[in-house]
Amino acid sequence: MTSPASSQPATTPGSTPATPATSTAPATPAAPDKRTPRLGGAVWLALGVVYVVWGSTYLAIRIAVETMPSFLSAAARFLTAGLLLVGYLLVRQGPAGLRVSGRQLASAALVGVLLLTGGNGLVVLGETSVPSGLAALLVAAVPLWMVVLTAFGGGERPKRAELVGVLLGLVGLGVLSAPAIGGSVEPLGVILIICATLTWATGSFASKKVPMPGNVLAASAYQMLAGGFCDLLIGLVRGEQRGFDLSAVSGRSWLALVYLVLFGSLLAFTAYAWLLRSAPLTLVATYAYVNPVVAVLLGWLVLAEPLTGPTLAGGAIVVAGVCLVVSVSRRPGRPSKATSARR
């Protein structure tokens, strides 16, 4: 992975900024290139990681909260992952790898709280009463909120094809969720997860508007530490520590937590944080469409859950919506939301 684009002139390590050539003719300012750079293989690799790994984390969260408190388990996940990432940066880059300005640190902390406390923390709490598959379907509303925030808060009008792709994806998710919502589901859990989607979308949007650390790994570390610390405080305020017996945690819950730390946080969250800087926001948001499909497929492969007609039809519609959004994001000459925001 590479560092995000900067508004400053690009230089390589050990190089100096280029000096303009002397000319007798009046200098004509070059028009800024607003064309979207071709998306490289790193973008698609990172997007694939987010697609697949985060599609599996809903099941892992559900298993973890079987014998672990919700916010305390989220705190353990993100604090552990954040400290591991800090240790990695200290070994590989030394203290310079973690050096940021006060504004950058505050911005990273704010985004971390929005994403990992308001977003992920509420999903974890909601999954104590909502099935993991339905939780994944509800989280698929994130792209809709992102498009709305981009249109009204970012001053960037979405392309018609983007809106069609978003609506098509939501229709597919409605087909997917129709059998699930026919049963008895705790209303409060559903409300909590919907609130989580709003908070996550807000954090994702804010990360493109505030001065984030230039080192994406350092930014991820600070976000996870801030979000995990707030999860810990909320868990303690809610009294989750009372009556909690560490020896009563099942082996499968421990394995689920380890998976969430290593893959859901260290790998996928870092990939997501990098994508927010390196790819169009509407393209990044398509993970919320693919994650439910991945969750359904994993349920079929691992737990032998049946693939029904609505599941197959809804999955096909979702994939069609994703393909439409992706095709618009790759179209030459389209301004990139990821690089247009100045930091």
Image (cartoon, rainbow, N blue to C red):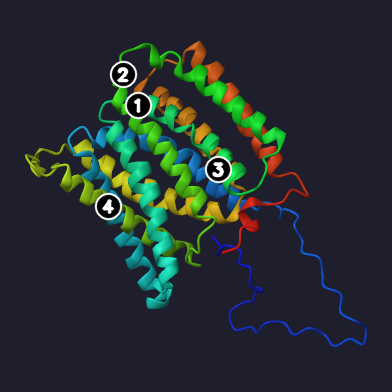
Which quadrant is home to the C terminus?
bottom right
Q: Real-space Cα distance between discs 4 and 1?
A: 22 Å
Could you tell which of marks 3 and 4 lies nearer the N-terminus? 3
Picture quadrant of residue 124: top left
Q: Left or right? Give the position of 308 relative to 327.
A: left
Residue denoted by label 1: 190
Q: Real-space Cα distance between discs 2 and 3?
A: 29 Å
Q: Real-space Cα distance between discs 3 and 4?
A: 25 Å
Could you tell which of marks 3 and 1 lies nearer the N-terminus? 3
Q: Real-space Cα distance between discs 1 and 2?
A: 8 Å
Q: Position of residue 298 (x, y in %)?
A: 42, 28
**Is label 3 in contact with label 4 (beta carbons under 8 Å)?**
no
What is the number of the mark on residue 230? 4
Residue denoted by label 2: 185
Q: Left or right? Give the position of 244 relative to 324.
A: left
Q: Which residue is drawn at 49% across and 55% down?
A: 207
Q: Position of residue 191 (x, y in %)?
A: 35, 28
